[in-house]
Image: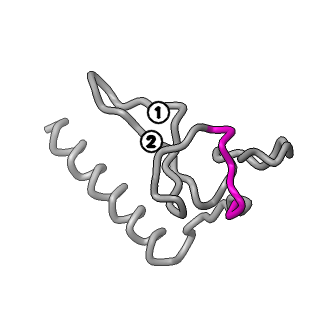
């Protein structure tokens, strides 16, 4: 049920998640999974529960601390390789 509005597509809906396929390597498909209708859908198959996708970035202090710890660990592993 596409209501004719160009922006109301599953690709831009917060309820739809992109499907990935694993063969020789991961790649994304043109299909989406609608969590409201609980079924696979195509990009242009929007429904009455369409919501604009909200982009959220997790920049919490704990996440930044985890990244710093990971970078230090990688540095340690690389210095072990040089020896």
Q: Residue at x 16, y 38 (%)?
A: 81
Assign a secondary structure to mark 1: strand
Q: Residue at x 53, y 75 (%)?
A: 60
**Outermost residue toward the right in this view:** 5
Which residue is at the front of the view, 50 or 69?
50
**Outermost residue toward the bottom in this view:** 61
**Outermost residue toward the top in this view:** 24
Residue 25: x percent and y percent?
31, 26
Query: How many tags in the picture?
Result: 2
Find the distance from the CA under tag 2 to the CA under tag 1: 6 Å
In the picture provided, is 63 more to the left or to the right than 75?
right
In the picture, the quarter occupied by the C terminus is: top left
Q: Residue at x 65, y 47 (%)?
A: 10
In the picture provided, is 22 more to the left or to the right than 13?
left
Tell me which corner region of the image, top left, top right, bottom left or bottom right, holds residue 51: bottom right
Magenta-tinted stretch: 43-50
- Of callouts 2 and 1, which one flags the residue occurring earlier in the amino acid sequence? 2
Residue contact between numbered discs 2 and 1, judged by CB atoms under 8 Å? yes
Question: Circle 2 is placed at which residue position?
Answer: 19
Image vertical order of residue 14 relative to residue 78, above or below: below
Question: Circle 1 is placed at which residue position?
Answer: 28
Q: Residue at x 45, y 70 (%)?
A: 63
């Amino acid at each position: 049920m596409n209501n004719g509005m160009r922006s109301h597509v599953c690709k831009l809906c917060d309820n739809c998640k992109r499907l990935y396929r694993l063969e020789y390597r991961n790649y994304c498909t043109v299909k989406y999974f609608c969590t409201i209708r609980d079924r696979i859908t195509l990009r242009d198959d929007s429904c009455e529960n369409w919501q604009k996708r909200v982009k959220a970035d997790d920049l919490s202090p704990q996440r930044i601390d985890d990244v710093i710890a990971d970078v230090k660990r990688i540095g340690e592993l690389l210095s072990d390789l040089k020896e």
